């Protein structure tokens, strides 16, 4: 904080004025030494001594005012500068002998005052000093009946020098102020650009790690922390804290690449990432930029493209099948209206109708996927939404559904409200079908918590036997089901709805039952 204050323009002004106050006291000491050790003057010694003592008292007063800042800066410069020129001009007139060059002391004072104040006051100090020297010479000329006018010549020379000094010093000081303001504006622009760059790096989906050759981390963004499940509150110093496998790959890169502008890429298996190394080494500051690409996300994008093509193809087939299927179901229902069918024929008739209904349900799901409207995200107050969902779902279904909402009173997420409700209905229906315990009862728990990656996670856990290991990789595939009457589209639709709302649906390891987790974005931005 202190260094910042000294760099502010106001603090620098006061600091310069304090230096000038010290210079004033040093010049007074010079005149005292001149008084005690110089034999040039004898007649006016008492006057010289009195003026010097009064000037010394004013010097101490101005030093105190400058240190305490009780008087404004401009007033202090004007008052102290006027006293300085009056005192020094009087002392120089008492000494006389301007030919010896003592008038240079006024030049130094005027130069210092011109740096401290704007141009008009600088001219004022130069004019005041010139007038005082001329007046002093005029009174000495009259009092001593001098016939030599040479002292007026030297006074004029000094006066011209005073004006030249004040204008030059003011011009240089003004140029410094302009340069300083320009540098300040540039620093603000650079600070703004730095914030923009930090924001962009932080919002990238790719992980970014910037480190030196000693593996000391200079920068790591949120995506990189998320990939390696690193807490945001932990300060990471070295690459070893991030991943030992990544550290080995980095050592490999350094061993094989000696060029300053070299690059390389490799693959990490756990987590599944593509790693790019870019050497940004210079002579004085060797460093490496690491870019991490989520291969799972890339695989998901490829899968989405395939599923989109499959969806369009399936939708066209489903549309063609719907009309014949409806005709078959209608025709079968007409059989036996007169009561002529026996029990076996009635059973076969009902079997055909049931399978027609099942196929019609599959066709409806496929068409729903192909004709789905765009999501309409909105800010949802999660706790109130889940309480309402529990009440409505339990009114239509007999189940044991509990909520664990955590300590946070208000938690908002951005999601399409109807689609989030549809996802929860699918997961709860799935739990009621597959999550029964040994007694045939179903107990479900919906829990909400915030993860280390600053995300909100909604988890749904049931009390059933869980999902067999051999089925874990297939549960989100379309048309995969373990029930004879199932369509195999529920979890696929739920996952697809999550992805179009920029969320993720995953199966989480659980000691009992199955645990599905929906990872949502926290509503930390305005929705417009």
Image (spheres, rainbow, N blue to C red):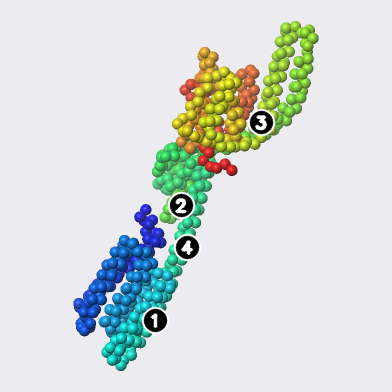
Residue 399, position as x, y percentages in the image: 55, 19
Query: Where residue 281 is drawn, which disc sits there?
Result: 2
149 or 334, which lies in front? 149
Q: Residue at 40% x, 59% y: name it.
A: 8
- Say whether disc 4 or disc 1 marks the residue closer to the N-terminus: 1
Dot in front, 3 or 4: 4
- Say whether disc 1 or disc 2 marks the residue closer to the N-terminus: 1
Q: Residue furthest bottom?
A: 147
Say what secondary structure mark 2 lies in: loop
Say what secondary structure mark 1 lies in: helix
Callout 3 touching callout 2 (CB < 8 Å): no
- Say whether disc 3 or disc 4 marks the residue closer to the N-terminus: 4
Query: Where residue 379 is drawn, which disc sits there?
Result: none
In the rendered image of this protein, does residue 373 appear above or below residue 152?
above
In the rendered image of this protein, does residue 448 appear above or below residue 331?
below
Dot in front, 3 or 2: 3
Q: Residue at 37% x, 62% y: name it.
A: 12
Which residue is disc 3 drawn over? 369
345 or 113, which lies in front? 113
Which residue is disc 1 drawn over? 160
Residue 439, position as x, y percentages in the image: 52, 13
User: Is residue 31 at all visible to an observer of this figure?
Assistant: no
Counting other residues with Cα less than 10 Å from the Cα at mark 1, is it few (<14), some (14-19), or many (20 or more)?
Answer: some
Counting other residues with Cα less than 10 Å from the Cα at mark 3, is it few (<14), some (14-19), or many (20 or more)?
Answer: many
Residue 431, position as x, y percentages in the image: 56, 21
Determine the image quadrant of residue 81.
Answer: bottom left
Structural distance between the alpha carbons of marks 4 and 2: 31 Å
Which residue is disc 4 drawn over? 182
Structural distance between the alpha carbons of marks 3 and 4: 59 Å
């Amino acid at each position: 904080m202190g260094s910042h204050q000294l760099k502010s323009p106001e603090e620098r002004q006061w600091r310069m004025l304090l230096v000038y106050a010290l210079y004033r006291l040093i010049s007074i000491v010079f005149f005292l030494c001149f008084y005690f050790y110089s034999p040039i003057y004898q007649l006016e010694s008492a006057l010289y001594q009195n003026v010097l003592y009064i000037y010394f008292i004013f010097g101490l007063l101005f030093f105190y005012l400058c240190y305490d800042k009780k008087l404004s800066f401009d007033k202090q410069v004007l008052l102290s500068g006027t006293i300085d020129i009056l005192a020094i001009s009087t002392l120089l007139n008492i000494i006389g002998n301007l030919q010896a060059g003592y008038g240079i002391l006024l030049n130094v004072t005027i130069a210092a005052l011109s740096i401290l104040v704007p141009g008009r006051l600088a001219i004022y100090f130069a004019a005041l000093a010139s007038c005082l020297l001329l007046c002093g010479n005029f009174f000495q000329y009259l009092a001593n009946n001098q016939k030599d006018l040479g002292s007026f010549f030297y006074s004029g020379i000094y006066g011209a020098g005073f004006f030249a000094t004040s204008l030059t010093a003011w011009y240089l000081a003004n140029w410094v102020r302009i340069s300083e303001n320009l540098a300040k504006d540039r620093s603000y622009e650079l600070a703004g650009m730095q914030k923009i760059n930090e924001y962009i790096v932080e919002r990238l989906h790719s992980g970014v790690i910037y480190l030196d050759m000693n593996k000391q981390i200079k920068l790591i963004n949120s995506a990189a922390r998320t990939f390696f499940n690193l807490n945001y509150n932990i300060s990471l110093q070295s690459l070893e804290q991030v991943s030992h496998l990544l550290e080995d790959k980095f050592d490999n890169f350094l061993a094989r690449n000696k060029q300053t502008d070299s690059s390389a890429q490799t693959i990490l298996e756990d987590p599944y990432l593509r790693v790019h190394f870019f050497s940004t080494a210079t002579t004085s500051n060797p460093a490496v930029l690491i870019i991490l690409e989520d291969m799972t996300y890339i695989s998901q994008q490829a899968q989405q493209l395939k599923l989109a093509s499959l969806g369009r193809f399936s939708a066209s087939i489903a549309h063609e099948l719907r009309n014949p299927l409806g005709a078959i179901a209608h025709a079968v229902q007409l059989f036996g209206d007169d009561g002529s069918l026996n029990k076996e024929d009635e059973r076969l008739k009902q079997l055909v109708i049931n399978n027609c209904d099942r196929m019609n349900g599959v066709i409806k799901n496929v068409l729903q996927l192909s004709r789905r409207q765009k999501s309409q995200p909105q800010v949802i107050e999660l706790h109130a939404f889940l309480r309402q969902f529990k009440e409505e779902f339990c009114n239509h279904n007999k189940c044991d559904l509990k909520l664990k909402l955590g300590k946070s009173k208000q938690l908002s997420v951005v999601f399409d409200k109807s689609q989030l409700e549809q996802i929860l209905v699918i997961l709860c229906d799935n739990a009621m079908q597959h999550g029964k315990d040994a007694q045939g009862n179903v107990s479900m728990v919906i829990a909400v918590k915030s993860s280390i990656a600053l995300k909100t996670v909604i988890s749904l856990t049931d009390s059933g036997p869980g999902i067999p290991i051999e089925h874990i990789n297939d549960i989100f595939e379309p048309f995969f089901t373990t029930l004879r009457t199932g369509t195999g589209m529920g979890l696929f639709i739920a996952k697809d709805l999550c992805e179009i709302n920029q969320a993720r649906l995953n199966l989480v390891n659980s000691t009992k039952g199955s645990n599905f987790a929906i990872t949502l974005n926290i509503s930390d931005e305005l929705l417009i």
